């Protein structure tokens, strides 16, 4: 049995830098990009701005590791090699999280889906709830910038997958091998928008908001 923790920030929107639209129906976003592209960073700001529920499979897995559950112990070995955890594990975690939040205005998926099998499973889970992905926001960052950011985070985060350059590069290889195709999968439904992921956190946040607002109007 997997226990999960989901961050829910249904509080008044604190950002006034650009016009947020109220979400009147369920709106689901995938924040997509390679490791270190700013998914976690931007997710925190987006959920606060739009009142979405944040589902980060990386956070869920790290919570399992911190609690030393059997799943967490197994996942740690895989994550420390820079590889992806098996699809059935992360799909199970997301399925439980969706069921635990029936009244959500929408979900922000961060670091999920990471394979085509995960994408297909997510679409089926959302279909069962009469909803779908509204947009896939794909952050674009050069490889050298990714490595720099992750190694820099490794100096303070305590994350064992961030403090070794070989592991960081292995995660990027894994991304190109198994995850980049997720953007192609959603492109066939015309859901992907590419957003420049280099610049200040505020500039990138404003670009993401502008793409979301277009789809909410
Ligand atoms: P995740 O937790 O998803 O981690 P990540 O992709 O490395 O980080 P993220 O992209 O969110 O980091 P951010 O840029 O915000 O995954 C970790 C591991 O879990 C995976 O390798 C895999 O093993 C496993 N896993 C997770 N989901 C899975 C799934 N669905 N299937 C299978 N396995 C899965 O931050 C990076 C750094 O950049 C930060 O220090 C930040 O401060 C900095 N930064 C952000 N924006 C910046 C900017 N604009 N300028 C400068 N620095 C910036």
Image (cartoon, rainbow, N blue to C red):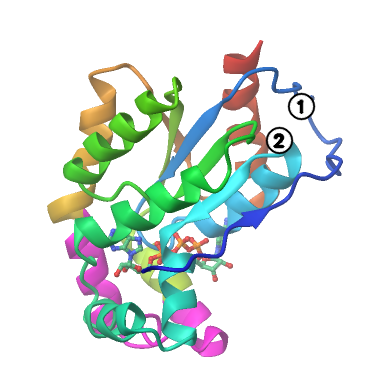
User: Do residues under tags 2 and 1 come within 8 Å of each other at their CB atoms?
Assistant: yes
Q: From the Cβ of disc 1, is ligand 1 less than 8 Å away?
A: no
Instruction: Provide the secondary structure element on which disc 1 rests.
Output: loop
The stretch drawn in magenta includes residue 201:
no
Q: In which quarter of the image is ligand 1?
A: bottom left
Instruction: Characterize the local packing of mark 1: few (<14), some (14-19) or many (20 or more) Cα atoms within 10 angstroms.
Output: some
Front position in the image: 133 or 182: 133
Instruction: Provide the secondary structure element on which disc 2 rests.
Output: helix
Front position in the image: 150 or 8: 8
Q: What stretch is highlighted in magenta?
A: 151-175
Front position in the image: 198 or 174: 174
- Determine which residue is flagged by label 1: 20
Q: In this view, does 43 lie to the left or right of 91?
A: right
* Quarter that holds the C terminus: top right
Residue at x 72% of width, y 39% of height: 51
Please tell me in which quadrant of the rendered image residue 37 appears. Answer: bottom left
Residue at x 51% of width, y 52% of height: 55
The stretch drawn in magenta includes residue 160:
yes
Residue 137 point in image, percent of width and height: 45, 35
Q: Is residue 147 above or below residue 39?
A: below
Residue 50 marker: 2
Q: In this view, does 193 lie above or below 202?
A: above
**Total count of labels:** 2
State whether the magenta stretch is mostly helix, strand or loop.
helix
Q: Is residue 79 visible?
A: yes
């Amino acid at each position: 049995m997997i226990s999960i923790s989901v961050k829910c920030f249904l509080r008044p929107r604190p950002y006034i830098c650009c016009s947020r639209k109220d979400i009147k129906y369920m709106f689901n976003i995938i924040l997509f990009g390679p490791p270190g592209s700013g998914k976690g960073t931007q997710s925190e700001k987006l959920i606060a701005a739009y009142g979405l529920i944040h589902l980060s499979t990386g956070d869920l897995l790290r919570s399992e590791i911190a609690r030393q559950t059997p799943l967490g112990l197994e996942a740690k070995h895989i994550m420390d090699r820079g590889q992806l955890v098996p699809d059935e594990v992360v799909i199970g975690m997301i399925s439980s999280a969706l069921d635990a939040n029936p009244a959500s205005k929408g979900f922000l998926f961060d670091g999920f889906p990471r394979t085509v099998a995960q994408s297909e499973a997510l679409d089926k889970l959302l279909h069962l709830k009469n909803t779908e992905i509204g947009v896939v926001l794909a952050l674009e960052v050069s490889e050298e910038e990714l490595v720099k950011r992750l190694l820099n985070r490794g100096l303070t985060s305590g994350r064992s997958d961030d403090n070794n350059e070989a592991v960081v590069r292995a995660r990027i290889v894994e991304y190109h091998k198994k995850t980049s195709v997720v953007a192609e999968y959603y492109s066939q439904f015309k859901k992907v928008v590419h957003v420049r992921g280099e610049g200040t956190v505020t500039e990138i946040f404003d670009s993401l908001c502008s793409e979301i607002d277009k789809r909410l109007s």
